[in-house]
Image (cartoon, grey):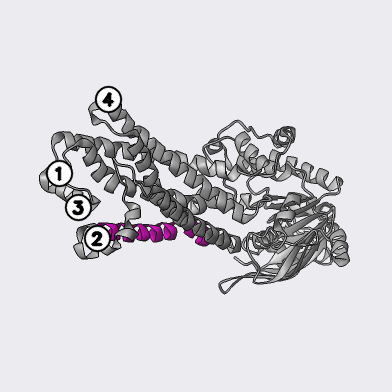
Amino acid sequence: MIYRRLLCAIFVARTENLTKLYNNRIGIDSLTLEVEPGEVFGFLGLNGAGKTTTIRLLMDLIRPTSGRALLFGMDSHAQSVHIRKLVGYLPAQLSLPRFTNGANVLRYFSNLRGGVPAGKIEHFAERLNVNLNVPIQRLDESDTFKIGLVQALMHDPELLILDEPTRFLDDAGREALYEIIAEVRREGRTVFISSRSLGEMERIADRVGVIHRGKLVTVERGVHLRAKAFREVELQFAGPVPHEVFESQPSLRNLRWQENRLHCFVTGDPQALLELARKQNEVMDFKARQPSLEEAFSQYYGVGYAG
Amino acid sequence: MPGEVFIQALRTTLRVWIRCTTLNAIAIAGLLGWHAAGVPQPVRQAFARLSGEGMPLTSLVDWLGAAGFGILFPLILSGYAILIGSQLMAGKEEREMLALVLAFPIPRWRIVIEKALGLTAGILLATTGLRLCLIIPALIWPTLAISAEGLSSASFELSLPAILIGNLALAIASASGRLAYSRWVSLSVLAGWSGLVFLSRLVNGLSFLSPLTESLSVQFPTPNPALARLALICAVLLSMVWIAAARAFAQRDLSE
């Protein structure tokens, strides 16, 4: 009992060699991770990497083949009803009753929780800018997910589990959610958020668990992830430049030359590269883009794209 | 809050039952119209044998009792009960909503039981709707002289097989999460049950099946004296189905 309480104080969520097989296909494989109280834990992976499987196991929607999941020191299956009082959850796929409006759906969810103050619901609906009086069947996916977010947030849960919440959100909704997540964190509550976006994880997460083909590849501090951030850069010079100046730069990788055009990956701030380039010759064109998650995976962790 | 899932299930049931009541009203209108136009003697004989009623089925009430309460209404109601029972646990929208509802602090068994109670209450309300459908012609043509007691008893009796088969569909859907599978298995059970009922009436040598099969036959216009016993048997069977459904759902892996 003391050990369990201690664990609860250290970890809000913990999985121990959690494995899930779907027939013979691996959902997740011996996943062990820990989520600390008051942190925003990002769970980053490609489509089909095992993010949703892990979250469903934490929520006791599916049962592990082996291993176990603990939330607040309690077994996610044996004490699932107690756990769910403390958790707010948004699934990756959300379907709401079509023949009613958002207000009625949220009233239903509120009643399932034994009643939530109406003011709370209105507060989050306002912040996420969703009209609760419109019939669900007339809402787009972004607004449907905002209603899903309101139900996850409305009871001020100790742990917020969000499965790819920004996938369908518009830019304003995404910004509003980031603000809410920051507030939740400031209040000492915990957020477990999955995503396919490296940029998003860099921005909001304190720590990021990277999952690939069902295996946890690494858990990084957000600051480390940001330091590792790289971009694909394309530079067009007005005339010839000495290649060795660029090839000797440690922050540049995968350099490719096409006459006076340079393609490369730059780690850290691309502004330094631009300044260096300007010293060599006139820069006619400069393009920089964030790498895709697949490229980032390949660069950081040496894992191939699952396709 | 207790009852929230029950209310939602009742709403869904009633929304679908409106269509069922419409179909029953069409069946009633068809039977009344057919009777007014004159039902041929061989058809009346066939309906009398299938429903277990005595000939000649010349009065409108007897005709309604044999063709409607004896054959058509139980089949329509049971068919709809299967559709709704399976949909409540395995319909596309309900299945997707389950992922969210199961994130709330409600035990899984309670979700099944509340849905089953919602279905059962919906069926009882729907048979009341059927009763109202029959009262309207009786009000228009007072010569019909449909006994209110007989009608009430028959409507309740009519709801029992629908409740049983609907809850069976719900239980299978709870255990498997598969809509089509639940519907086909329940329809097969209904087909087997109805087949036995009709066979026991048509084939003299199979009359020993009658105690087993009479539960599906509705006595109208005279009230069934064994209705209380029948309701008790249904309640026992229903409890068994509910316990099995709740257990299966509590253990189910919602991977799909």
Q: Residue at x 84, y 58 (%)?
A: A36
Q: Is residue B13 above or below residue A70?
A: above
Q: Dot 4: within a 10 Å radius of its alpha carbon, few (fewer than 14), some, or many (20 or more) residues?
A: few
First to last magenta residue range:
B171-199
Whether residues under marks 4 and 1 lie with C-beta atoms below 8 angstroms apart, the answer is: no
Task: Judge from the rendering whether residue A220 lies leftward or rightward of residue B115; answer left or right.
Answer: right
- Report the front residue among B57 and A90: B57
Q: Residues within 10 Å of mark 3 (few under 14, many from 20)?
A: some
What kind of element bears circle 1? loop
Q: Residues within 10 Å of mark 2 (few under 14, many from 20)?
A: some
Q: Quadrant of residue A255?
A: bottom right
The answer to the question of whether label 3 and label 4 lie on touching residues, with beta carbons closer than 8 A, is no
**Residue A57: horizontal and vertical position, in percent?**
67, 62
Q: CA distance from mark 2 to mark 4?
A: 37 Å
Q: Which mark is residue B140?
A: 4
Indicate the amino acid at tag 1.
Pro
Residue B178 sits inside the magenta stretch: yes
The Cα atoms of the two marked residues, 1 and 3, are separated by 11 Å
Of all residues, the one furthest to the front in this rendering is B225
Element carrying mark 2: helix
Query: Label 2 marks which chain's residue?
Result: B
Dominant SS type (magenta): helix
Q: Which residue is identified by label 1? A: B56
Mark 4 belongs to which amino acid? Ile
Q: Which residue is mark 2?
A: B199
Pick whichever of labels 4 and 1 is earlier in the sequence: 1
Which of these two is toward me, B192 or A208?
B192
